Amino acid sequence: MRTCRCTPGAIDTYQRRLSGPLLDRIDLQVSVCRVPIEALASEPRGEPSSLVRERVIHARRRQIERQGALNSQLKPGRLRQLAPLAPGSRRTLERWSAQRGLTARGFHRAWRVARTAADLDGSDEVLEHHILEALGFRLQDVAA
Amino acid sequence: MAIVGSRRPSPYGEAVAEQLGLELARAGVVVVSGLALGIDAAAHRGALNGGGVTVAVMGTGVDVIYPVAHTVLAESILAAGGALVSQFPDGTAPRRHNFPARNFTMAAISDVVVVVEAAEGSGALITAEAALDLHKEVMAVPGSVFSPLSVGTHSLLRDGAGLVQNARDVLALLNRGGEVLDDPLATPQTLGFRLRPERDGILSHLSDVLALNAAELARKLQLPVAEVLGRLTALELDGAVRRHQGGYVRALRRGKERA
C-alpha cells in the first residue's frame, strides 16, 4: 500500500469538502487496496462477471414482479410493507442508527439496500445479516 | 514525563498511550504532551481518566487551540488542574516551523520522554533528540515489526532508549517505586465483551495494528464478501472491531465504557 503523504490536517480538510448530506446519499462505499503486480497472475479467478450479471438481472426481476418498481424507488411506507423487519433485525438497525447518529434518510437508505441484498440472495424476507451487510457498506457513518 | 508519538497512530499505539497516561497519572506523575491528534491526545485523555494532572505544551499561542477539535480536551485539561503552556505570544497561529521549537520545550520541562509510535523523521523523534541533548531519559514503546510507525521507536530502542512495556518501567526509572516485571499491559480488548465463537471467529484473523478490508479478509477465509462484511458489522456494533484506514482492526478500547 502507498501511504498518503498529506498532513492529518490536510486530509481532514479534504474529507470535510464532502458534506454530510452528500455522503448520506451514498449507499455503497467500498475500499479497495492496491494489488501487487506479481500477485495478479496467481490470484484465484473469483466469480465471472457474466454470473454476477445473471444474479443482478434476477434480483431486478424479483423487484419488478413484487412491487412494480425497483427497491431504490420505494417510499418509506412501501418499504415497511414490502421489507418488514423481524424484531432482531430492527433492533440492529436501530442500534446502529443510535451509535452513528444516522439520519432518517440514512436509516431508510440502509433498509432499502438490505432489501436488495435479500433479493440478490433470493430471499423473500429481509434477515438480520442483510441489514448488517447493508450497514457494512456505509463507510461514512462516523462513530459517535 | 512526556508521552509523544504519531498524529496518525494505529489503534494499538493509541491504546498504549492512553493506558500509560492513565497509569502514570494514577501514580502521581504529571503527563506532558503536545495536544496534537493521535498519541498526544490519547496520553492527555488517559491522564485525565486516571484523575491526574496533565500539561499541554502548545506550538501556538495559548489562546489558539490547535487542532480546533481539541477545544473540549483543552478545557478538560484546565478543569482537572492541568495547564496549557506555550513559548509563543498570544494569537500565534499554527506555523510549521514553530512545532520543532515546541518539541524542544516539551523535552526541556520533562524528566523522561516516552515515544509511542513514530515513523521515520516524525516530530516525536525531534522531541527524543532534544531530550538526549538535554541529558534527559528517552524511552520507547515497541510496536509491530510490520508497521511503518515502529521504525522510529525501534531505532531509538536500538540506540539504547529504555524499553517501555508498562507504566512500571517508567516509574522505576523515575525512582517512583515498583520493580520492573515483564508482564504486559492489561489488555483491555476483552473487557465487557461477550465472545460468540460462531460469529467472532474472524476476530482472530484481524490485527490491532494493520487494517484489513472485508474483501481481503473474505479471500483469506474463503468466505463470501457479503457474509464477512455482515459479520464485521456485527462485531463493529459490539465495539469489538473498528474501521481504520478503509479497513477493519480489532478494537483495543471499549470507548466510553473503559474511560
Image (cartoon, rainbow, N blue to C red):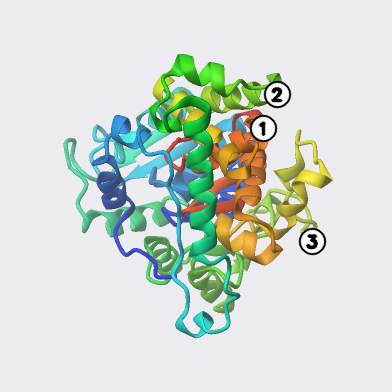
Numbered disc in front, either 1 or 3: 1
* Of B130 and A36, the residue lying toward us: A36
Q: Position of residue A50 (x, y in %)?
A: 50, 63
* Of B158 and A105, the residue lying toward us: A105
Which numbered tag is attached to residue B44? none
Q: Identify the element where label 3 is drawn.
A: loop
Q: Position of residue A95 (x, y in %)?
A: 60, 24
Residue placed at 57% from the left, 55% from the top?
Answer: B214
Q: Disc 1 vs disc 2: Cβ atoms closer than 8 Å?
A: yes
The answer as to whether the residues below labels 1 and 3 share one chain is no
Q: Position of residue A87 (x, y in %)?
A: 69, 19
Residue placed at 63% from the left, 46% from the top?
Answer: B232
Q: Position of residue B51 (x, y in %)?
A: 60, 29
Amino acid type, residue under disc 3 in the picture: Asp
Inter-mark Cα distance, 1 to 2: 7 Å
Q: Identify the element where label 1 is drawn.
A: helix
Picture quadrant where residue B107 is located:
bottom left
Inter-mark Cα distance, 1 to 3: 44 Å
Amino acid type, residue under disc 1 in the picture: Glu
Chain under disc 2 = A
From the viewer's perspective, tell me whether residue B257 is left or right of residue B91.
right
Quarter of the image with the C terminus of chain B is top right
Amino acid type, residue under disc 2 in the picture: Gly
**Dot 1 corresponds to which residue?**
A128
* Any part of residue B253 in sight: no
Numbered disc in front, either 3 or 2: 2
The answer to which of marks 1 and 2 sits earlier in the sequence is: 2
Which numbered tag is attached to residue B182? 3
**Dot 2 corresponds to which residue?**
A88
- How packed mark 2 is, by other alpha carbons closer than 10 Å (few <14, some 14-19, many 20 or more), is few
Chain under disc 3 = B
From the viewer's perspective, tell me whether residue A133 is left or right of residue B190.
left
